[in-house]
Amino acid sequence: EIVMTQSPATLSVSPGERATLSCRASQNVNSDLAWYQQKPGQAPRLLIYGASTRATGIPARFSGSGSATEFTLTISSLQSEDFAVYYCQQYNDWPTFGQGAKVEIK
Amino acid sequence: QVQLVQSGALVEKPGSSVKVSCKATGGTFGGYTIVWVRQAPGQGPECMGRIIPILNIADYAQRFQGRVTITADKSATTVYMEVRSLRYDDTAVYYCARSQRFCSGGTCRKRADWFDPWGQGTLVIVSS
């Protein structure tokens, strides 16, 4: 099983600032990586797939980068609705998720 | 646009079984794969298994093999997930989601298991 490790576990950011989340795969997953946002009591919401392609309706302030084992999700200017938990997920092999990274208000 | 609607919350005893449904509204699953993902309290999501409804072919994560069964009805509009021999640590929210792994003519798109849309989730509590 491919293990996905996210860092940091919690990120404290002020509205309007930039947030950068990292995700590391235990082996090469090429660009087979997705990012999701989850708010309390809701299902995850797809943000990014193919490491860098935004899903339909996702604002341009969300961007993804990376390949192989190192990936990054950047939120360029945090809005109030962006404070949530973010998960990365690889699909190069049986799908596995990271443990999540919480973006909280500073 | 297809939406996924799941059955309601359940409380079950250890050792029993639970069956959760996931219905497509606004369309059918077509050739898409449907996956079941569970999320224990405070944990990340975990992919349990998936099914191609039009072919009724399922596969499972190794740790759930033999204890979980995923099926689809013939109309390919509802998918079911059964978990047997429930344990306390099966307490979780169970989600169905559509994978972009599309199958046609016996061939499935490879490396396309990102998930959108998702069902609303079904809370299963295992308690004596």
Image (spheres, coloured by chain):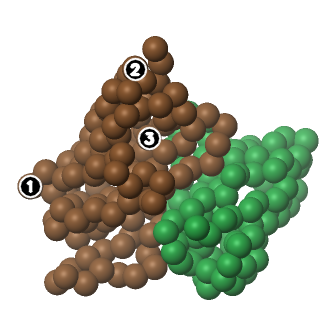
Q: Residues within 10 Å of mark 2 (few under 14, many from 20)?
A: some
Give the residue at mark 1: B74
Amino acid, disc 1 = Lys
Asked whether disc 3 touches disc 1, contact meaning CB atoms under 8 Å apart, the reply is no
Q: Which mark is residue B13?
A: 2
Q: Percent from the top left, x then y, of residue A44?
A: 54, 49
- State whether discs 2 and 3 lie on one chain: yes
Which chain is rendered green in the image?
A
Q: Earlier in the sequence, mark 3 or mark 1?
A: 1
Give the residue at mark 3: B94
For residue B78, say whether it is visible: yes
Q: Percent from the top left, x then y, of residue A106?
A: 90, 41
Separation of disc 2 and disc 3 at Cα? 17 Å
Q: Colour of chain B?
A: brown
- Front label number (2 vs 3): 2
Element type where label 2 sits in the image: loop
